[in-house]
Amino acid sequence: MKIALMDSGIGLLPAAAEVRRLRPDADLVLSSDPDGMPWGPRTAEDLTERALAVARAAAALGPAALIVACNTATVHALPALRAALEPDIPVIGTVPAIKPAASAGGKVAIWATPATTGSPYQRGLIRDFAEGADVTEVSCPGLADAVERADAEGIKRAVAAAAALTPRDVRALVLGCTHYELVAEEIRAAVQHPDLPPVVFHGSAGAVAAQTLRRIGAGAAPDADATGGLTVLLSGRTATLPEPALRYAEGRLLRAVSPAR
């Protein structure tokens, strides 16, 4: 069984690591676009063209499913990706976990890229799934780029700036960009106040991995000792995991248990 994931960069690592944990026997294809990133500042048409190229590079290897492990690409390119690949290859988008975050009540913050914050797409999710909740949209300029470069100082500055815009008594925080899940602990340290209850974080990696396996009718791994392969495509070129990916636990996990091929 082969599962592909796509993103502009290393934001696909959290979902890939979750798929690996659930199905260690699965072959993974990680398809990203270092030549064209960041995608956020691009027009919707340009972003869709880049996303289609990345998706087709992965689709050429015959995966059972393709995960769009990017919130921005899901917002702008998901219909085009599904039109191009389905029904042959199911395409699973990534949606910010606003519904579970709002279900417990209290104040909710949604950290997202400038391209997603305030977008009709995100506002629609808030309207549909967080009615009555006290929701604050927090734009995080520069954070995804700093995560992509594994720039510790850049991450620290961007997290601090976003934390300053986050209500002190927020009870749930939605990580509305897949890159942010790679620095969840840094974000937690910035928003958690010792005199208040723990902030509950809501990412998308676990949910999208489980949904993908359900979509293709795959359950738990029949052989937990099996190790699937790993194929890395950088703007369509076969490569290895980029060095910044290996600075994160998810990247090291994939390298450790996945023979590249």
Image (spheres, rainbow, N blue to C red):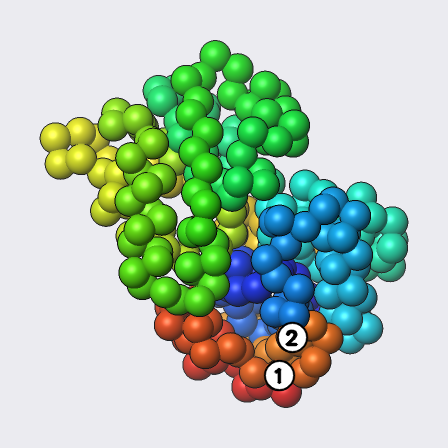
| Quadrant into which the N terminus falls | bottom right
Given residues 96 and 45, the one toward you in this image is 45
Residue drawn at (29%, 35%) of the image: 164
Q: Which of 28 and 223 is in front in this view?
A: 28
Instruction: Provide residue 192's location: percent of width, then percent of height.
Output: 22, 38
* Amino acid type assigned to the residue bearing label 1 in the image: Ala
Contact? badges 2 and 1 (CB < 8 Å):
yes
Q: Position of residue 124 (x, y in %)?
A: 63, 24
Q: Label 1, secondary structure: give it.
A: strand
In the displayed structure, does residue 98 sit left or right of residue 92?
left
Can you identify the residue that label 2 sits on? 234
Q: Three-letter amino acid code at disc 2?
A: Leu
Mark 1 Cα-neighbour bin, 10 Å: few <14, some 14–19, many ≥20: few
Dot 2 alpha-carbon crowd within 10 angstroms: few under 14, some 14 to 19, many 20 or more: many
Instruction: Please state which of residues 95 and 22 is positioned toward the viewer in this rendering.
Output: 95
Residue 18 seen in this snapshot: no
